[in-house]
Amino acid sequence: MTNTMTTLMIGDVVGGTSLRALLAYMPTLIATHQPDLIVVNAENAADGSGTSPRQAEELFAAGVHVITGGNHTLKRRSYHDMLRTDPRTLRPANLPTVNAPGAAIARIATTAGPAAVINLQGAVFLEASANPFAIIDDLIATAAAHSAQIFVDFHAEATSEKVALGHYVDGRVTAIVGTHTHVQTADARVLKGGSAYITDLGMTGPHDSVIGVNTQIIINRFLTGAPGRFVPAEDDIRIQGVVITSAADGRATAIARIDHPVDAPQHGNQ
Protein backbone atom coordinates (compact mmCIF):
# COMPACT_ATOMS: atom_id res chain seq x y z
CA MET A 1 0.00 0.00 0.00
CA THR A 2 1.22 3.50 -0.89
CA ASN A 3 0.32 7.03 0.22
CA THR A 4 -1.09 7.90 -3.20
CA MET A 5 -3.26 6.19 -5.79
CA THR A 6 -3.15 6.69 -9.55
CA THR A 7 -6.33 5.85 -11.43
CA LEU A 8 -6.86 5.61 -15.18
CA MET A 9 -10.47 6.06 -16.32
CA ILE A 10 -11.18 5.40 -20.01
CA GLY A 11 -14.16 6.85 -21.89
CA ASP A 12 -16.80 4.92 -23.80
CA VAL A 13 -15.32 2.24 -26.08
CA VAL A 14 -17.24 2.23 -29.38
CA GLY A 15 -17.09 -0.89 -31.52
CA GLY A 16 -14.85 -3.93 -31.79
CA THR A 17 -12.14 -2.18 -33.80
CA SER A 18 -11.77 0.43 -31.08
CA LEU A 19 -11.66 -2.24 -28.39
CA ARG A 20 -8.86 -4.07 -30.20
CA ALA A 21 -6.97 -0.79 -30.52
CA LEU A 22 -7.35 -0.17 -26.79
CA LEU A 23 -6.20 -3.70 -25.95
CA ALA A 24 -3.13 -3.31 -28.19
CA TYR A 25 -2.28 0.05 -26.62
CA MET A 26 -2.95 -0.95 -23.02
CA PRO A 27 0.68 -1.94 -22.26
CA THR A 28 1.78 1.54 -23.34
CA LEU A 29 -0.90 3.20 -21.21
CA ILE A 30 0.16 1.15 -18.19
CA ALA A 31 3.87 1.83 -18.73
CA THR A 32 3.25 5.56 -19.23
CA HIS A 33 0.81 6.26 -16.39
CA GLN A 34 1.51 3.34 -14.00
CA PRO A 35 -2.06 3.21 -12.71
CA ASP A 36 -3.04 1.35 -9.57
CA LEU A 37 -6.65 1.19 -10.78
CA ILE A 38 -8.03 1.05 -14.34
CA VAL A 39 -11.73 1.66 -15.08
CA VAL A 40 -13.16 1.37 -18.60
CA ASN A 41 -16.67 2.20 -19.80
CA ALA A 42 -17.46 -0.49 -22.39
CA GLU A 43 -21.21 -0.11 -22.90
CA ASN A 44 -20.78 0.49 -26.65
CA ALA A 45 -18.01 -2.03 -27.32
CA ALA A 46 -20.09 -4.75 -29.01
CA ASP A 47 -20.80 -3.34 -32.47
CA GLY A 48 -21.68 0.01 -30.89
CA SER A 49 -24.29 -1.25 -28.44
CA GLY A 50 -23.61 -3.34 -25.35
CA THR A 51 -20.69 -5.50 -24.22
CA SER A 52 -19.91 -9.14 -24.91
CA PRO A 53 -18.51 -11.51 -22.27
CA ARG A 54 -15.46 -12.14 -24.46
CA GLN A 55 -14.75 -8.41 -24.65
CA ALA A 56 -15.00 -8.11 -20.87
CA GLU A 57 -12.62 -11.02 -20.34
CA GLU A 58 -10.12 -9.51 -22.77
CA LEU A 59 -10.25 -6.18 -20.95
CA PHE A 60 -9.64 -7.90 -17.60
CA ALA A 61 -6.76 -9.90 -19.08
CA ALA A 62 -5.23 -6.63 -20.32
CA GLY A 63 -5.17 -5.18 -16.78
CA VAL A 64 -8.55 -3.47 -16.42
CA HIS A 65 -9.99 -3.71 -12.90
CA VAL A 66 -13.58 -2.52 -13.42
CA ILE A 67 -15.89 -2.27 -16.45
CA THR A 68 -18.68 0.30 -16.15
CA GLY A 69 -21.77 0.65 -18.29
CA GLY A 70 -24.66 2.86 -19.26
CA ASN A 71 -28.01 2.84 -21.01
CA HIS A 72 -26.88 0.09 -23.44
CA THR A 73 -25.38 -2.25 -20.85
CA LEU A 74 -28.23 -4.78 -20.98
CA LYS A 75 -28.47 -4.91 -24.80
CA ARG A 76 -26.52 -8.18 -25.03
CA ARG A 77 -28.25 -10.96 -23.09
CA SER A 78 -25.05 -12.99 -23.12
CA TYR A 79 -23.56 -10.32 -20.82
CA HIS A 80 -26.29 -10.63 -18.19
CA ASP A 81 -24.79 -13.69 -16.50
CA MET A 82 -21.43 -11.95 -16.27
CA LEU A 83 -23.11 -8.95 -14.63
CA ARG A 84 -24.66 -11.32 -12.08
CA THR A 85 -21.53 -13.30 -11.29
CA ASP A 86 -18.48 -11.06 -11.87
CA PRO A 87 -18.27 -8.18 -9.35
CA ARG A 88 -15.89 -6.31 -11.65
CA THR A 89 -18.67 -5.67 -14.18
CA LEU A 90 -21.07 -2.85 -13.34
CA ARG A 91 -24.31 -1.38 -14.62
CA PRO A 92 -25.86 1.94 -13.53
CA ALA A 93 -27.68 1.73 -10.21
CA ASN A 94 -30.82 3.32 -11.65
CA LEU A 95 -31.39 1.56 -14.97
CA PRO A 96 -35.13 1.61 -15.80
CA THR A 97 -35.23 -2.19 -16.19
CA VAL A 98 -37.03 -3.95 -13.34
CA ASN A 99 -34.72 -6.37 -11.49
CA ALA A 100 -31.77 -5.48 -13.71
CA PRO A 101 -28.94 -8.01 -13.36
CA GLY A 102 -25.69 -6.97 -11.75
CA ALA A 103 -24.44 -4.43 -9.25
CA ALA A 104 -23.67 -0.72 -9.30
CA ILE A 105 -20.70 -0.75 -6.90
CA ALA A 106 -17.41 -2.62 -7.26
CA ARG A 107 -15.00 -3.07 -4.37
CA ILE A 108 -11.45 -3.53 -5.62
CA ALA A 109 -8.16 -4.38 -3.91
CA THR A 110 -5.29 -2.53 -5.60
CA THR A 111 -1.56 -2.28 -4.93
CA ALA A 112 -2.26 1.16 -3.44
CA GLY A 113 -5.04 -0.08 -1.17
CA PRO A 114 -8.80 -0.66 -1.48
CA ALA A 115 -10.97 1.33 -3.88
CA ALA A 116 -14.65 1.47 -4.79
CA VAL A 117 -16.27 2.30 -8.12
CA ILE A 118 -19.88 3.49 -8.46
CA ASN A 119 -21.90 3.41 -11.70
CA LEU A 120 -24.89 5.76 -12.00
CA GLN A 121 -27.10 7.08 -14.80
CA GLY A 122 -28.57 10.51 -15.43
CA ALA A 123 -32.32 11.18 -15.56
CA VAL A 124 -32.31 14.15 -17.96
CA PHE A 125 -32.92 13.00 -21.57
CA LEU A 126 -32.37 9.37 -20.43
CA GLU A 127 -34.71 6.87 -18.81
CA ALA A 128 -33.86 6.15 -15.19
CA SER A 129 -35.62 4.29 -12.41
CA ALA A 130 -34.66 6.91 -9.84
CA ASN A 131 -33.35 10.44 -9.62
CA PRO A 132 -29.55 10.10 -9.28
CA PHE A 133 -29.52 12.83 -6.61
CA ALA A 134 -31.95 10.77 -4.54
CA ILE A 135 -29.80 7.62 -4.46
CA ILE A 136 -26.19 8.85 -4.62
CA ASP A 137 -25.94 9.43 -0.85
CA ASP A 138 -26.68 5.77 -0.07
CA LEU A 139 -24.31 4.59 -2.81
CA ILE A 140 -21.49 6.72 -1.40
CA ALA A 141 -22.18 5.49 2.14
CA THR A 142 -21.95 1.88 0.94
CA ALA A 143 -18.74 2.54 -0.98
CA ALA A 144 -17.19 4.50 1.92
CA ALA A 145 -17.58 1.48 4.20
CA HIS A 146 -15.00 -0.22 1.97
CA SER A 147 -12.60 2.59 1.06
CA ALA A 148 -11.91 6.32 1.11
CA GLN A 149 -11.00 6.02 -2.59
CA ILE A 150 -14.37 6.30 -4.37
CA PHE A 151 -14.75 6.79 -8.13
CA VAL A 152 -18.08 7.55 -9.82
CA ASP A 153 -18.91 6.98 -13.49
CA PHE A 154 -21.96 9.19 -14.07
CA HIS A 155 -23.41 8.15 -17.43
CA ALA A 156 -25.54 11.14 -18.38
CA GLU A 157 -26.57 13.35 -21.28
CA ALA A 158 -27.07 16.82 -19.81
CA THR A 159 -24.00 18.83 -18.83
CA SER A 160 -26.00 20.71 -16.19
CA GLU A 161 -26.96 17.46 -14.47
CA LYS A 162 -23.35 16.27 -14.50
CA VAL A 163 -21.94 19.55 -13.16
CA ALA A 164 -24.61 19.78 -10.46
CA LEU A 165 -24.02 16.22 -9.24
CA GLY A 166 -20.29 16.89 -9.23
CA HIS A 167 -20.74 19.81 -6.85
CA TYR A 168 -23.27 17.84 -4.78
CA VAL A 169 -20.82 15.02 -4.05
CA ASP A 170 -17.68 17.18 -3.90
CA GLY A 171 -15.54 16.21 -0.93
CA ARG A 172 -17.30 12.87 -0.50
CA VAL A 173 -15.81 11.00 -3.47
CA THR A 174 -12.34 10.90 -4.97
CA ALA A 175 -13.64 11.55 -8.47
CA ILE A 176 -16.85 11.86 -10.44
CA VAL A 177 -16.49 11.61 -14.21
CA GLY A 178 -19.10 11.87 -16.92
CA THR A 179 -19.58 9.41 -19.75
CA HIS A 180 -22.15 8.92 -22.57
CA THR A 181 -21.77 11.94 -24.90
CA HIS A 182 -18.59 10.62 -26.59
CA VAL A 183 -17.12 14.15 -26.71
CA GLN A 184 -14.28 14.90 -24.30
CA THR A 185 -14.82 18.13 -22.39
CA ALA A 186 -12.11 20.64 -21.44
CA ASP A 187 -13.17 21.17 -17.81
CA ALA A 188 -11.08 18.58 -15.94
CA ARG A 189 -10.35 20.00 -12.49
CA VAL A 190 -10.23 19.27 -8.78
CA LEU A 191 -13.26 20.85 -7.13
CA LYS A 192 -13.04 22.86 -3.90
CA GLY A 193 -13.84 19.91 -1.66
CA GLY A 194 -11.16 17.70 -3.19
CA SER A 195 -13.08 15.66 -5.77
CA ALA A 196 -11.68 15.33 -9.29
CA TYR A 197 -14.24 16.14 -11.97
CA ILE A 198 -14.75 16.16 -15.75
CA THR A 199 -18.08 16.51 -17.55
CA ASP A 200 -17.20 13.80 -20.08
CA LEU A 201 -14.23 11.47 -20.46
CA GLY A 202 -14.70 11.39 -24.22
CA MET A 203 -14.71 8.43 -26.57
CA THR A 204 -12.32 5.58 -27.14
CA GLY A 205 -13.34 5.18 -30.73
CA PRO A 206 -13.30 6.50 -34.29
CA HIS A 207 -13.27 10.28 -34.27
CA ASP A 208 -13.77 10.54 -38.04
CA SER A 209 -17.45 9.87 -37.35
CA VAL A 210 -20.53 11.26 -35.64
CA ILE A 211 -19.84 10.26 -32.02
CA GLY A 212 -18.57 6.89 -33.22
CA VAL A 213 -21.09 6.08 -35.96
CA ASN A 214 -20.45 6.13 -39.71
CA THR A 215 -20.84 9.79 -40.69
CA GLN A 216 -22.98 9.32 -43.81
CA ILE A 217 -25.52 7.17 -41.95
CA ILE A 218 -26.13 9.96 -39.45
CA ILE A 219 -26.19 12.70 -42.09
CA ASN A 220 -28.77 10.71 -44.08
CA ARG A 221 -30.86 10.31 -40.95
CA PHE A 222 -30.88 14.06 -40.37
CA LEU A 223 -31.63 14.76 -44.05
CA THR A 224 -34.44 12.25 -44.48
CA GLY A 225 -35.65 11.30 -41.00
CA ALA A 226 -35.47 7.66 -42.08
CA PRO A 227 -34.10 5.23 -39.49
CA GLY A 228 -31.00 3.21 -40.27
CA ARG A 229 -28.74 0.75 -38.53
CA PHE A 230 -25.95 2.49 -36.68
CA VAL A 231 -22.63 1.12 -37.93
CA PRO A 232 -19.46 2.07 -36.01
CA ALA A 233 -16.88 3.96 -38.04
CA GLU A 234 -13.23 2.84 -38.00
CA ASP A 235 -11.01 5.83 -38.83
CA ASP A 236 -9.02 8.15 -36.55
CA ILE A 237 -9.32 6.01 -33.43
CA ARG A 238 -8.34 7.80 -30.24
CA ILE A 239 -8.21 6.66 -26.63
CA GLN A 240 -9.66 9.30 -24.33
CA GLY A 241 -10.05 9.52 -20.58
CA VAL A 242 -8.32 10.91 -17.52
CA VAL A 243 -5.56 10.07 -15.07
CA ILE A 244 -6.37 10.91 -11.46
CA THR A 245 -3.94 11.13 -8.54
CA SER A 246 -5.34 10.93 -5.02
CA ALA A 247 -4.01 10.98 -1.49
CA ALA A 248 -4.48 8.26 1.13
CA ASP A 249 -7.52 10.10 2.54
CA GLY A 250 -9.30 9.79 -0.81
CA ARG A 251 -8.98 13.42 -1.84
CA ALA A 252 -7.85 14.01 -5.39
CA THR A 253 -4.67 16.01 -5.92
CA ALA A 254 -4.67 16.11 -9.72
CA ILE A 255 -6.63 15.15 -12.82
CA ALA A 256 -5.28 15.23 -16.38
CA ARG A 257 -7.00 14.42 -19.65
CA ILE A 258 -5.53 11.85 -22.03
CA ASP A 259 -6.15 11.78 -25.78
CA HIS A 260 -4.00 9.18 -27.57
CA PRO A 261 -4.31 8.50 -31.33
CA VAL A 262 -3.80 4.80 -32.09
CA ASP A 263 -3.63 2.61 -35.17
CA ALA A 264 -6.67 0.45 -35.83
CA PRO A 265 -5.96 -3.30 -35.93
CA GLN A 266 -6.77 -4.77 -39.32
CA HIS A 267 -8.39 -8.11 -38.44
CA GLY A 268 -12.08 -8.95 -37.99
CA ASN A 269 -14.74 -7.47 -35.73
CA GLN A 270 -15.52 -8.56 -32.19
Image: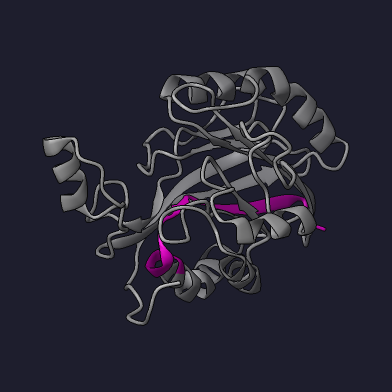
Find residue 265 and report its image quarter.
bottom left
**Left or right: 42 with respect to 82?**
left
The residue depicted at 71 percent of the width and 41 percent of the height is 104
* Closer-to-camera residue (216/61): 216
Where is residue 176? Give x, y as percent.
59, 34
Residue positioned most to the left: 223
Location of the N terminus by quadrant is bottom right
Determine if residue 2 is in view. Answer: no
Residue positioned most to the right: 145
**Left or right: 183 with respect to 118?**
left
The residue depicted at 76 percent of the width and 53 percent of the height is 84
Start and end of the magenta stretch?
A: 1-19
Magenta stretch containing residue 76, yes or no? no
Determine if residue 47 is in view. Answer: yes
The residue depicted at 59 percent of the width and 72 percent of the height is 58
Residue positioned most to the front: 226
Where is residue 186? Give x, y as percent.
37, 36
* Closer-to-camera residue (28/231): 231
Where is residue 253? Give x, y as percent.
61, 39
Above or below: residue 224 compared with residue 141: below
* Closer-to-camera residue (5/103): 103
Find residue 8 and report its image quarter.
bottom right
